[in-house]
Amino acid sequence: MQQETDVINSIEEIAKELKDAAWFIGQRVINREEVIEQAFCALLTAEHMLLQSRTGVGKSLLAEQIFSMFEGARLFRVQASKEQQPDTFFGGLDLEELKAGRIIHNTKGSLVESDFGFIDEIFDANDFTLRALLSLLNERRLLRGLQDVASPLHSVIAATNYLRVSEVTEALLDRFLFKAVILPDKDPFIQYQISQRYLVYGGRTAAPEKRISLARLQHMHKIITGRSEDFQIAITNELLYFTNIVIRHFEFLRNRQLSDHAKRGDGVDFYISPRTQAKSLDLLRALALLKGRTNVVHDDVSQLYFIFSTVGLPEEMALFKKAYTTVLNSLTASRGFDQVTILLDFTDLLREIKEDPKQMREPLSKFAESPVRRSFLDWVKEKFGSEQPVDQNRKLLEQFLTDFVPVCDEVRELFG
């Protein structure tokens, strides 16, 4: 029990560090709390973030202020332009190697050897340069000609005033799991606060009194990806199933929305890749960590719009929240969560028996290690009066499924 308490206290300490850092950024960059939380999720999951807004809204200030909260990290900054070549990001070409017909970049001081990157006006870069960036952003490797260099790159924040659509930019957008649109603030009091900060800082970042080390951030990343030996953030099987149902329902709603908006129904399709769906699990654990918990709860799923929608676009965000609420209400009102938990646990029980058929020769009571499995044994006693002889175990398992009545569509799909 003491060890468990220590773990919780440590997680709470980490959460407080992150909360304090986010608060400090919010004092400098006004009315951007949601985008700041989204950015911290991007850093915790070691993913990239794209900020879009009109000119002069403070994208660069926000990105610079976020990066200023971390110490020991190498930061690469660049403003993209159409004339730039890949060596702007990867380092200049080695002339001696070039004479021999080999393209080798001197990566010292480049994005390749940096921990963080800030790319301003990223869509001003030409497609040739953007294409060259794809492997570095995704695989964290510089792959150019014969050169194959691993990169420590943790996260990139890119900013843009517009989206440019092409085959290459679509692939680039896929590398930026977190996206946000920052709209100008017209509220008089918000504008007053922004003016106040400008008088104090003159458009510059504020120096934080306390910073988070890069090593600490990397440790946090290990926690939320399940690779830490010290801490684990748990996701139950029932919550995994719930998450996947919500994501699928959102995908359905988004496609129906796009179909309604399309004038001729010309092949509009919204697709969530298995890779993105898997990454959502890291985001769930990051959200739990930010709140100082060692377990993921249903409410964390409601914030998955951080990656499945563009933060700042109310219509997209509302659609995801609708998908979450619809599935949650359906499973809660019908007590479907209880059935989902029982069925998933029953599936695990069958898998164990399949892996070790000898277990069918033993009394089923040996499986009563969890409350859910004990509920199965309670059903056996209620149905048959007492636990049956071992030679009838198979019939018991089959009868349990025969008597099981799903209470809602979400359970019925799992049961089917």
Image (cartoon, rainbow, N blue to C red):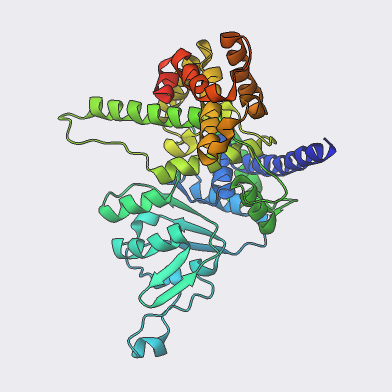
Expressed as whole percent of the image width and height from the top left, the position of residue 43 reads 57, 49
The answer to whether one can see residue 312 in this image is: yes
Expressed as whole percent of the image width and height from the top left, the position of residue 120 reads 44, 56
Q: Is residue 223 left or right of residue 186?
A: right
Tell how many labels: 0
Query: Looking at the rendering, in which quadrant would you find the C terminus?
Result: top left
Residue name at image x 39 percent, y 30 percent: 248
Q: Quadrant of residue 180?
A: top left
Q: 89 and 388: which one is in front?
A: 388
Q: 18 and 56: which one is in front?
A: 18
Expressed as whole percent of the image width and height from the top left, the position of residue 332 reads 53, 15
Q: Quadrant of residue 73?
A: bottom right
Query: Looking at the rendering, in which quadrant would you find the N terminus?
Result: top right
The answer to whether one can see residue 31 in this image is: no
Q: Quadrant of residue 371?
A: top right
Q: 290 and 93: which one is in front?
A: 290
Q: 7 and 357: which one is in front?
A: 357
